[in-house]
């Protein structure tokens, strides 16, 4: 079932959905007034409260969506539920109950999918907020209003930056060490390859001179001895290069292991420093979303996109939750009771029929008089 949840995005379900394909129009009737906006958020134990600047002009960003039930269109909920019309005759109640039971199975699955999509969208919005505040921090600090919003987290940011610099320095040291090792490894590889190439060429020449020396050519014997000396020297150099290569590979692995051990503590420290910083950034970012303080920034587009996706996902989840309880409970109970009564009647009828058949089969056969 495809459920477009509004102008900001679409939310659907698997193609094997038993329900019909719907195109739902979302109608939000309740607006958020200024009094509904949350107050300034406390910055925590290290700082004071976050100053939220006055809201930007209307339409500069997305307003918060109300969680009340009256901003959902009943017609949209009815079409999404697809329970059909309420029974108007007693005999329609069992059919209605059967359809409700069938649709509830699909709606529960769709509601779970919508809830998971909302969770993912909320996490994506948080990531977009943190990425924006990190990337645009220099620009925001140059503005007086936004600089006051970021001021309470200066200490958290400083601790995070120190861990981040330590991690970057460790990575740079490893890269420098590995670069030196890799350069020497390349030199060893060149020595080994040169020895192999030289050995192949000298082997052919040595074979020719060997045959000539066996024929009594003294000069060929001298040249053969010289070539054998060259081959031995090249082989000795290649053997040393291979041994050095093995040593360098061992040294490279030791560098990497030492780096992993050293950076493990750095990563843990960076993670511990980043957790409160991220939480504080999210507090600031969420307050800014309510006040639309950053709406005019050139890098705010991804945040607005993520915010629309989160609002659409939340609306889709609420539509499915409302659809799950939108059936006529009285008619469902009547229909269920009628179905139970029908099943009981069928069972009783079958039992009575079996008992009657058993009596008929066990009755004695009539005696037919014989003619003398």
Image (cartoon, rainbow, N blue to C red):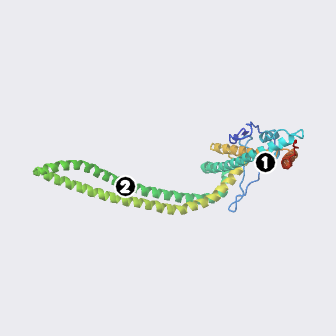
Q: Residue furthest front?
A: 372
Any part of residue 208 in sight: yes
Query: Measuring 13% from the left and 51% from the top, which residue is drawn there?
Result: 214
Question: Which residue has dot 1 on it?
Answer: 67
Dot 1, crowdedness within 10 Å: few (<14), some or many (≥20)? Answer: few
> The C terminus lies in which quarter of the figure?
top right
Position of the N terminus by quadrant = top right
Q: CA distance from mark 2 to mark 1?
A: 64 Å
x 68%, y 62%: residue: 46
Left or right position of 346 against 216: right
Which disc is residue 185 wearing? 2
- Residue 329 shows up from this direction: no
Secondary structure beneath dot 2 equals helix
Crowd band around label 2 with a 10 angstrom C-alpha radius: few (<14), some (14–19), many (20+): many
- Numbered tag placed on residue 355 in the rendering: none
Q: Secondary structure at mark 1?
A: loop
């Amino acid at each position: 079932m495809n459920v477009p949840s509004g102008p900001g995005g679409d939310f659907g379900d698997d193609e094997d959905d038993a329900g019909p394909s719907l195109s739902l129009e979302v109608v939000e009737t309740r607006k958020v007034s200024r009094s509904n906006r949350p107050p300034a958020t406390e910055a925590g134990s290290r700082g004071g409260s976050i100053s939220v600047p006055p809201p930007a002009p209307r339409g500069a960003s997305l307003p918060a969506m109300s969680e009340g039930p009256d901003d959902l269109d009943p017609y949209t909920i009815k079409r999404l539920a697809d329970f059909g019309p309420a029974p108007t005759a007693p005999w329609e109640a069992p059919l209605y109950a059967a359809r409700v039971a069938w649709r509830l199975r699909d709606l529960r699955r769709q509601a779970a999918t919508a809830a998971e999509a909302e969770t993912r969208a909320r996490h994506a919005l948080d990531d977009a907020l943190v990425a924006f505040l990190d990337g645009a921090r220099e620009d925001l600090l140059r503005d007086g209003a936004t600089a006051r919003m970021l001021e309470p987290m200066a200490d958290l940011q400083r601790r995070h930056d120190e861990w981040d610099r330590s991690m970057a320095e460790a990575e740079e040291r490893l890269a420098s060490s590995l670069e030196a090792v890799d350069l020497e490894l390349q030199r060893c590889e060149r020595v080994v390859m040169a020895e192999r190439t030289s050995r192949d060429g000298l082997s052919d020449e040595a074979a020719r001179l060997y045959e000539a020396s066996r024929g009594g050519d003294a000069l060929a014997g001298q040249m053969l001895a010289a070539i054998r000396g060259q081959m031995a020297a090249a082989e000795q150099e290649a053997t040393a290069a291979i041994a050095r290569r093995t040593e360098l590979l061992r040294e490279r692995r030791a560098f990497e292991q030492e780096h992993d051990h050293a950076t493990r503590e750095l990563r843990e420290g960076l993670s511990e420093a980043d957790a409160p910083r991220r939480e504080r950034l999210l507090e600031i970012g969420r307050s800014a979303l309510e006040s639309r303080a950053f709406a005019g920034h050139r890098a705010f587009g991804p945040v607005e996109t993520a915010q629309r996706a989160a609002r659409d996902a939340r609306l889709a989840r609420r539509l499915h939750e409302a659809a799950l309880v939108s059936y006529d409970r009285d008619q469902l109970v009547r229909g269920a009771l009628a179905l139970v009564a029908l099943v009981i009647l069928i069972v009783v009828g079958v039992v009575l029929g079996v008992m009657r058949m058993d009596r008929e089969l066990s009755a004695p056969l009539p005696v037919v008089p014989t003619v003398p």
